[in-house]
Amino acid sequence: MDSGSVLQNIINTQQERITGMQVNYYLSCRTKLWLYSHSISLEHTSELIKLGELLHQEYFNSQRKDVFYDGVAFDVIKPNKQIVEVKRGTRVRECDIYQTLYYLYYLEKHGVKGFTAVLTYPRARKKLVLTLDNEKRKRLDEIIRGIREIVKQPYPPPPKKKKFCQGCAYFDFCFG
Ligand code: SF4
Protein backbone atom coordinates (compact mmCIF):
# COMPACT_ATOMS: atom_id res chain seq x y z
CA MET A 1 0.00 0.00 0.00
CA ASP A 2 1.45 3.42 -0.92
CA SER A 3 1.64 6.30 1.55
CA GLY A 4 -1.38 8.05 -0.05
CA SER A 5 -3.58 4.97 0.55
CA VAL A 6 -2.29 4.65 4.12
CA LEU A 7 -3.15 8.30 4.75
CA GLN A 8 -6.59 7.86 3.19
CA ASN A 9 -7.23 4.84 5.43
CA ILE A 10 -6.30 6.89 8.49
CA ILE A 11 -8.63 9.72 7.36
CA ASN A 12 -11.46 7.23 6.73
CA THR A 13 -10.97 5.69 10.16
CA GLN A 14 -11.05 9.14 11.79
CA GLN A 15 -14.25 10.01 9.92
CA GLU A 16 -15.87 6.72 10.85
CA ARG A 17 -15.06 7.00 14.52
CA ILE A 18 -18.01 8.02 16.63
CA THR A 19 -17.44 9.88 19.89
CA GLY A 20 -19.41 9.70 23.12
CA MET A 21 -20.53 13.31 22.65
CA GLN A 22 -22.06 12.41 19.28
CA VAL A 23 -24.06 9.65 20.98
CA ASN A 24 -25.22 12.16 23.57
CA TYR A 25 -26.18 14.78 20.96
CA TYR A 26 -27.98 12.22 18.78
CA LEU A 27 -30.35 11.59 21.68
CA SER A 28 -30.58 15.18 22.95
CA CYS A 29 -30.44 17.38 19.83
CA ARG A 30 -29.77 16.37 16.25
CA THR A 31 -29.03 19.95 15.17
CA LYS A 32 -26.27 20.04 17.75
CA LEU A 33 -25.03 16.66 16.58
CA TRP A 34 -24.68 17.92 13.02
CA LEU A 35 -22.99 21.21 14.04
CA TYR A 36 -20.57 19.48 16.41
CA SER A 37 -19.76 16.75 13.87
CA HIS A 38 -18.92 19.38 11.27
CA SER A 39 -16.52 21.06 13.70
CA ILE A 40 -18.74 24.11 14.12
CA SER A 41 -17.74 24.59 17.71
CA LEU A 42 -19.01 27.35 19.96
CA GLU A 43 -18.45 25.40 23.17
CA HIS A 44 -15.78 27.76 24.52
CA THR A 45 -18.24 30.65 24.55
CA SER A 46 -20.63 29.01 26.95
CA GLU A 47 -20.30 29.78 30.65
CA LEU A 48 -22.16 26.56 31.44
CA ILE A 49 -19.58 24.53 29.58
CA LYS A 50 -16.86 26.20 31.64
CA LEU A 51 -18.75 25.37 34.83
CA GLY A 52 -18.99 21.75 33.70
CA GLU A 53 -15.24 21.65 33.12
CA LEU A 54 -14.58 23.03 36.61
CA LEU A 55 -16.88 20.47 38.17
CA HIS A 56 -15.11 17.75 36.25
CA GLN A 57 -11.68 18.90 37.49
CA GLU A 58 -12.96 19.10 41.05
CA TYR A 59 -14.43 15.60 40.92
CA PHE A 60 -11.19 14.05 39.75
CA ASN A 61 -8.90 16.19 41.88
CA SER A 62 -8.46 13.68 44.66
CA GLN A 63 -8.67 10.57 42.50
CA ARG A 64 -6.28 8.89 40.20
CA LYS A 65 -7.15 9.60 36.64
CA ASP A 66 -6.07 8.33 33.30
CA VAL A 67 -7.32 9.32 29.89
CA PHE A 68 -7.63 6.99 26.92
CA TYR A 69 -7.52 8.93 23.72
CA ASP A 70 -7.99 7.48 20.29
CA GLY A 71 -10.50 9.89 18.85
CA VAL A 72 -12.72 8.64 21.64
CA ALA A 73 -11.77 10.10 25.02
CA PHE A 74 -12.96 9.20 28.47
CA ASP A 75 -11.77 9.19 32.05
CA VAL A 76 -10.67 6.04 33.76
CA ILE A 77 -10.00 5.44 37.41
CA LYS A 78 -7.24 2.91 37.05
CA PRO A 79 -7.34 0.73 40.16
CA ASN A 80 -11.06 -0.01 39.70
CA LYS A 81 -11.07 -0.26 35.89
CA GLN A 82 -13.92 2.18 35.98
CA ILE A 83 -14.93 4.56 33.24
CA VAL A 84 -16.42 7.67 34.79
CA GLU A 85 -18.63 10.24 33.13
CA VAL A 86 -19.27 13.36 35.22
CA LYS A 87 -22.31 15.51 34.46
CA ARG A 88 -23.10 19.02 35.58
CA GLY A 89 -26.88 18.58 35.62
CA THR A 90 -29.03 17.06 38.33
CA ARG A 91 -31.42 14.98 36.23
CA VAL A 92 -30.50 11.54 34.91
CA ARG A 93 -30.96 11.67 31.15
CA GLU A 94 -31.08 8.89 28.57
CA CYS A 95 -28.48 10.71 26.45
CA ASP A 96 -26.01 10.65 29.37
CA ILE A 97 -26.66 6.96 30.02
CA TYR A 98 -26.02 6.00 26.41
CA GLN A 99 -22.98 8.27 26.14
CA THR A 100 -21.47 6.44 29.11
CA LEU A 101 -22.51 3.01 27.87
CA TYR A 102 -20.95 3.82 24.51
CA TYR A 103 -17.48 3.87 26.08
CA LEU A 104 -17.98 0.30 27.31
CA TYR A 105 -19.35 -0.68 23.91
CA TYR A 106 -16.39 0.97 22.17
CA LEU A 107 -13.89 -0.88 24.34
CA GLU A 108 -15.75 -4.15 23.84
CA LYS A 109 -15.60 -3.69 20.05
CA HIS A 110 -11.83 -3.37 20.45
CA GLY A 111 -11.61 -6.55 22.51
CA VAL A 112 -11.16 -4.77 25.86
CA LYS A 113 -13.35 -6.19 28.60
CA GLY A 114 -13.64 -6.07 32.38
CA PHE A 115 -14.53 -2.39 32.76
CA THR A 116 -17.55 -0.93 34.49
CA ALA A 117 -19.05 2.44 33.72
CA VAL A 118 -20.18 5.00 36.25
CA LEU A 119 -22.34 7.99 35.43
CA THR A 120 -22.24 10.59 38.15
CA TYR A 121 -24.05 13.87 38.89
CA PRO A 122 -22.02 15.36 41.77
CA ARG A 123 -24.39 18.31 42.33
CA ALA A 124 -27.30 15.91 42.86
CA ARG A 125 -25.16 13.29 44.63
CA LYS A 126 -26.35 10.69 42.15
CA LYS A 127 -24.23 7.85 40.88
CA LEU A 128 -25.29 5.08 38.49
CA VAL A 129 -23.27 1.97 37.71
CA LEU A 130 -24.01 0.94 34.13
CA THR A 131 -23.50 -2.31 32.28
CA LEU A 132 -24.12 -3.44 28.73
CA ASP A 133 -26.62 -6.08 27.74
CA ASN A 134 -27.80 -7.23 24.33
CA GLU A 135 -30.70 -4.81 24.22
CA LYS A 136 -28.38 -1.86 24.92
CA ARG A 137 -25.82 -3.08 22.39
CA LYS A 138 -28.60 -3.25 19.78
CA ARG A 139 -29.75 0.25 20.69
CA LEU A 140 -26.18 1.54 20.35
CA ASP A 141 -25.91 -0.12 16.93
CA GLU A 142 -29.04 1.79 15.89
CA ILE A 143 -27.76 5.04 17.39
CA ILE A 144 -24.51 4.76 15.47
CA ARG A 145 -26.35 4.13 12.21
CA GLY A 146 -28.55 7.15 12.97
CA ILE A 147 -25.53 9.36 13.68
CA ARG A 148 -23.94 8.46 10.36
CA GLU A 149 -27.18 9.29 8.52
CA ILE A 150 -27.44 12.74 10.11
CA VAL A 151 -23.78 13.61 9.74
CA LYS A 152 -23.75 12.87 6.01
CA GLN A 153 -26.64 15.31 5.37
CA PRO A 154 -25.50 18.55 3.67
CA TYR A 155 -27.36 20.78 6.17
CA PRO A 156 -28.18 20.55 9.88
CA PRO A 157 -31.67 19.38 10.87
CA PRO A 158 -33.79 22.47 11.68
CA PRO A 159 -33.51 23.44 15.37
CA LYS A 160 -36.44 22.66 17.64
CA LYS A 161 -36.70 24.65 20.86
CA LYS A 162 -36.27 22.59 24.01
CA LYS A 163 -36.06 23.36 27.72
CA PHE A 164 -32.28 23.17 27.74
CA CYS A 165 -31.68 25.34 24.62
CA GLN A 166 -31.06 28.40 26.82
CA GLY A 167 -27.94 26.78 28.24
CA CYS A 168 -26.66 25.55 24.87
CA ALA A 169 -23.57 27.05 23.29
CA TYR A 170 -25.36 27.09 19.91
CA PHE A 171 -28.38 29.06 21.14
CA ASP A 172 -27.56 32.27 19.22
CA PHE A 173 -26.69 30.25 16.16
CA CYS A 174 -30.10 28.51 16.24
CA PHE A 175 -32.38 31.24 17.49
CA GLY A 176 -30.41 34.51 17.40
S1 SF4 B 1 -29.91 25.68 20.88
FE1 SF4 B 1 -31.33 23.97 21.12
S2 SF4 B 1 -31.83 23.38 19.00
FE2 SF4 B 1 -29.96 24.61 18.91
S3 SF4 B 1 -28.28 23.16 18.98
FE3 SF4 B 1 -28.66 23.83 21.08
S4 SF4 B 1 -30.05 22.31 21.94
FE4 SF4 B 1 -30.12 22.09 19.72
Image (tube, grey):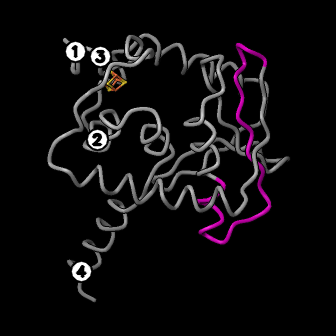
The quadrant of the image that shows the N terminus is: bottom left
Q: Specify the quadrant of the image occupied by residue 136.
A: bottom right
In the image, what residue type sits under mark 2?
Trp
**Position above or below: 1 against 103:** below
Residue type of the residue flagged with mark 4: Ser
Determine whether the residue tagged by mark 3 lies in a helix, strand or loop. Answer: helix
Secondary-structure class at tag 1: helix
- Horizontal side of 140 relative to 28 (left or right) equals right
Mark 1 and mark 2 lie on one chain; the one further toward the N terminus is 2
Pointers 1 and 3 in contact (CB under 8 A)?
A: yes
Task: Find residue 109 and report its image quarter.
Answer: bottom right
Q: CA distance from mark 1 to mark 3?
A: 6 Å
Q: Nearer the viewer, residue 90 or 142?
A: 142
- Asked if the residue at label 1 sits under 8 Å from ligand 1, the reply is yes
* In this rendering, the label closer to the viewer, 4 or 2: 2
Q: Is residue 158 left or right of residue 126?
A: left
Q: Which mark is residue 5?
A: 4
Rendered location of residue 135, percent (x, y): 66, 59
Name the disc covering residue 171, or none. 3
Q: Residues within 10 Å of mark 3 (few under 14, many from 20)?
A: some
Residue placed at 56% from the left, 56% from the top?
A: 139
Q: Which residue is mark 1?
A: 175
